Amino acid sequence: MDLRTLRYFVAVAEELHFGRAAVRLRMTQPPLSRAVKQLEADLGAVLLRRSATGVALTPAGTALYEEARALLEQAGRARQRVAAAAGEATLTLGMLADSAEQAGARLAAAYRRRHHGVRVVVREADFADPTTGLRAGLADVALTRTPFDETGLTTRVLRSDPVGVVLRADDPLAHHGALPLDALADRTWFRLPEGTDPVWSAYWCGGTDEGRGAAGRGDGPVVRTVHECLQAVLWSGTVGIAPLTHALPEGLTAVPLLDVAPSSLVVAWNSADARPLVHSFVRLATAG
């Protein structure tokens, strides 16, 4: 067993779905499936029961999951200690779209003052992974938006923002003061990549995990970035949800939605991560 394979297995064990685990790990599904099958062969035990809807842990899989989590956490602490001893402490900050800018320049300045010897590496994720790589071990702490599956993670709300539907300026609904979600029931909504967290996908794509609002059509374009979302609206008349705080390009407008809960800008981290650099970031992000 190596740490990479254990990280793969933990992702599948937590997602209980190879497709979602592959998206989380930013890889394709076939090599992930092969790696887990090879792990089962190496251990001589069936770890997962596979079905058309997903997977379930066997007793052997549950035992390995507990041990693998402990080993990965220990490996993370070992890397941190080695980096600190070498004088090369690093914090990897995951962010989604403009979440870092939304959090404000104050945070970056405060962290630099508090930890002037720490190298901060910024990793931007696309919409397929709202946790920005936290579960895959690609980020130490994240600035992102809710809602998403928070299993194994801890979040602190920095700000909550109302959301609206993004429309072309010449859309018949564009001049309404506010709209219920049902008013968009016949519209085509943009979709997020297959395997994306269903909680996240349902919220931003109109209320269902198929990526359509109410009786709306779910055959819209698949998008991964803010720019792709906005261009889908501009060129194709697709609709989608966005925070009202976001600036929109010419030709687009956002109409507030009456029955969609606000989206929160949050700082997030792995619940088991006790490293001082991570918790110092959280304290500074939530201060004031």
Image: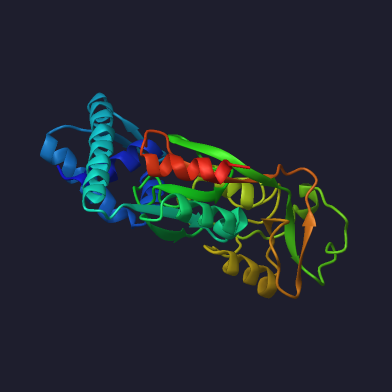
How has the structure been colored for display? rainbow
Compared to residue 242, the image places residue 250 above or below, namely: below
Residue positioned 28% across, 51% down in the render:
32
Q: Is residue 66 left or right of residue 256?
A: left
**Quadrant where the image shows the C terminus:** top right
Relative to the observer, which residue lies in front, 59 or 74? 74
Q: Give residue 71's position: percent from left, percent from top.
A: 22, 36
Residue 218 occupies quadrant: bottom right
Is residue 20 shown left or right of residue 98?
Answer: left
- Tally of numbered discs: 0
Compare residues 211 and 176 and report the one nearer the observer: 176
What residue lies at 52% left-to-right and 62% top-to-bottom? 224
190 with respect to 40 (left or right)? right
Q: Is residue 194 visible?
A: no
Residue 66 placement (x, y as % from top left): 27, 28
Seen in the picture, residue 246 relative to 65 is either above or below; the reply is below
Question: Residue 44, image x and y in percent?
Answer: 12, 34
Q: On the picture, is 131 further left or further right than 75?
A: right
Q: Residue at x 78, y 50 (%)?
A: 257
Viewer can see residue 7: yes
Q: Position of residue 232 (x, y in %)?
A: 63, 69
Identify which residue is drawn at 44% across, 39% down: 279
Q: Assign the N terminus to one quadrant of the image.
A: top left
